[in-house]
Amino acid sequence: MAFIEVLLPAMGEGIIEATLISWMKNEGDTVAIDENLIEVATDKVNSEVPSTASGVLHKRLFSENEIISVGKPFAILSTGGSEEQAPAPILTEKKVEDLVKTEVAQIESNISPPVVLISNEDRFYSPLVMNMAKEEGISQAELDSISGTGQSGRVTKDDMILYLKSRTTALPEKQILSTSVKTSVEAGNQKNVFGSNPEKINTPIDFGPNVEVQKMDRMRKLIGEHMMKSVQTSAHVCSFVEADMTNIVLWRNKVKTKFKEKYGENLTFTPILIEAIAKALIEFPMINSSIDGDNILLKKEINIGMAAALPDGNLIVPVIKNADMLNLLGLAKKVNDLGQRAKKNQLKPDEIQGGTYTMTNLGSFGNLFGTPIINQPQVAILGAGAIVKKPIVIESPEGDTIGIRSMMYLSHSYDHRVVDGMLGGTFVKRLAEILEGFDVNREV
């Protein structure tokens, strides 16, 4: 019998590890090549990892909610062959760390009684969660009281981190007093350091009978952290321009059926907007940049992210790489493919990485305009509002008239550390001019 290690493959630029969400095979199951073995989470994307060989799953090296490094083995497959011995244990960095922790625990057990925690079918805890609880001195009763957001209510690493944060925040005075008690006892002072009337500690907050407390899911917490980081990092400024979209609306209405029949793709306004944004970014390269300390990084590639709302209300930003090199058909294919797979949670980690500029379609929710938050580490983001028919003054050599036009607000948020008002305002004004100059006789 021969054995093969299955390694975690590269998950995208800058991604060095992933969290194991679930196993799709049990030990002893037959596995075919390219058959999915595990589901992992990286940043906002969940991905399925296939097997690189066929055989029988001999050993699962990680449990759910544990971290796997890219390039490291996560499973061992057994295949037909002459060898009858199992492979020698793989001494990874994680296992070395576990061995050290075991040695330390044995030493500490001679000093103080260990915290005994159990896991059963009714309340299963992964090794990672059990270790976190033991390290923090959490009792069995306290661990059982923690609400889990994992599968079947299982407590995850994120649940533990969130609980420990609230626990630390809620008990600072108790910890200080506990330390004082220990110090007093060690000094031979057996008196009650709390005094005659110790204050009540760790009183739970009562939100009232008509309040439902709902924990944030993993993606919502990541989005919140990302947005707060952006507001704390960038000096946000927002400029607004109104663009006349009449020519584009008339042209799209004329060709969308033909476009669908010819190419099998729906023609929405998004690829038309992205095409115009790419043209404007070529003229204003400072907008297509990011900041690294005191350095401004001017990006040669134009990779445009399009913010997409998921069915659960969360947000994800798939990226169209080298958008300036794609024609309208290529952009339409990319927009439709990424949008559809985003809704099904089928995006690959690399498909949400590497963006240099982002647009968000506020109009899809019926909003006229908004002030979008910059997608770090980029320096600007565009918000496209709803296209609305309005009476507009139309200037001509023969005189001014009032006509019904299809108008759209463009909201441009930018980082004032790099983009001044003139540059940020001029860029969005130029974008409006490109949209208004759309050729109504364009062929598909």
Image (spheres, grey):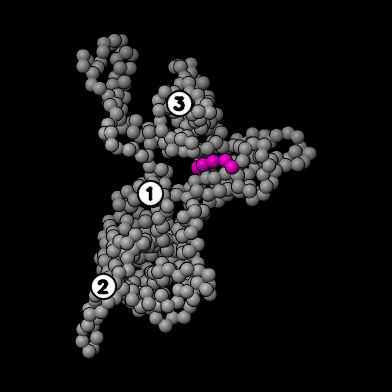
Observer-side mark, 3 or 2, equals 2
Under tag 2, what secondary structure?
strand
Label 2 crowd (10 A; few <14 / some 14-19 / many >=20): some
Which segment is the magenta one?
A: 19-24
User: According to the image, label 3 marks what residue?
Assistant: 134
Does the stretch in magenta take in 73?
no
Work out whether residue 385 or residue 281 is closer to the camera in this orientation and state it.
Answer: 385
Give SS at disc 1.
helix
> Residue 390, which numbered label?
2
Residue linked to disc 1: 223
Quadrant where the N terminus sits is: top right
- Residue 392 coordinates in the image, percent (x, y): 24, 76
Sort mark 1 into few (<14), some (14-19) or many (20+) by Cα contacts within 10 Å.
Answer: some
Q: Position of residue 195 (x, y in %)?
A: 22, 15
Q: Distance from label 1 to label 2 (Cα)?
A: 36 Å
Image position of 1 with respect to 381: above or below: above
Majority secondary structure of magenta residues: strand
Q: Residue at x 26, y 66 (%)?
A: 240
Image-based side of 99 in relation to 442, left or right: right
- The residue closer to the viewer here, 116 or 177, is 116
Magenta span contains residue 20: yes
Residue 192 visible = yes
Q: Which residue is situated farthest in the right direction here?
A: 82
Sequence-wise, which precedes: disc 1 or disc 3? 3
Residue 274 is at least partly visible in this image: no
Q: Cα distance, mark 3 to mark 2? A: 65 Å
